[in-house]
Amino acid sequence: MTCWRERRRRRGLPVNGGLFSLGGVDRDIETAQAPRHGMHRRRFLRRVGAAGGAAATTALAGCSAVGGEPGYDVGMMASAFRPAEVTVAVGDTVVWENTSARGHTVTAYENAIPDEAEYFASGGYDSEVAAREAWPEDFGGRLESGDRYSRTFSIPGRYEYVCLPHENGGMVGTVVVEE
């Protein structure tokens, strides 16, 4: 059995510098087929990448126009609500959608909503204590990827909420309801 250097030498490929041809003017990665076909990986990838990038941009350019809005107001990323703050009018409904692969909750901070407002949390809990107790027991209020939670806000004010499993990572959000 011959070593890789001998096999490369027989094919007319450079043997110093491993896979890279550092002695020539064109420093592309050379393949065994390069001498026969005039093909170099980097040159090929540059050409295909440029054409592929233009094709992808053209193909995706119409995506945002198709279907219009995403159908939700707040997306749940891996460890953040996007946007972190949303402003709506009294009577508007806010829709959250889990756009990540992780499980999330929408859980109001009971002391950070208007006094007259009704408490809200995914899972339908009546209090923050109930929501927090349900999470470690059976992942209560969990929204899986693609799940949605919605809430109609009838009292003006500032509503702060959290994702229970990602609270330590700072996954908090705010809904501002204006008259």
Image (cartoon, rainbow, N blue to C red):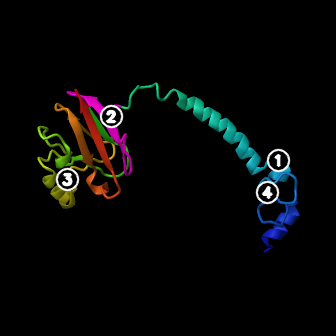
At numbered mark 3, what does the secondary structure look like: helix, strand or loop? loop
Please tell me whether mark 2 or mark 4 is closer to you in this view.
2
Please tell me whether mark 3 or mark 4 is closer to you in this view.
3
Residue occupied by mark 2: 73
The numbered disc on residue 17 is: none
Label 3 and label 1: CA atoms lie apart by 61 Å
Q: Residue at x 28, y 30 (%)?
A: 88
Amino acid carrying label 1: it is His
Residue occupied by mark 3: 140
Which quadrant: the C terminus?
top left
Q: Callout 2: 10 Å neighbours few (<14), some, many (20+)?
A: some
Label 3 and label 4: CA atoms lie apart by 58 Å
Residue farthest bottom in this picture: 1
**Percent position of residue 3, x then y:** 79, 73
Report if the CB atoms under discs 3 and 1 are less than 8 Å apart: no
State yes or no: residue 108 in magenta: no
Report if the CB atoms under discs 2 and 4 are less than 8 Å apart: no
Q: Residue at x 68, y 38 (%)?
A: 50
At numbered mark 1, what does the secondary structure look like: helix, strand or loop? helix
The numbered disc on residue 37 is: 1
Q: Callout 4: 10 Å neighbours few (<14), some, many (20+)?
A: some
At numbered mark 4, what does the secondary structure look like: helix, strand or loop? loop
Residue occupied by mark 4: 32
Residue nearest the observer in this picture, 39 or 57 = 57
- Is 134 left or right of 94, judged from the image as shown? left
Range drawn in magenta: 71-93
Tell me which label, 2 or 4, sits earlier in the chain.
4
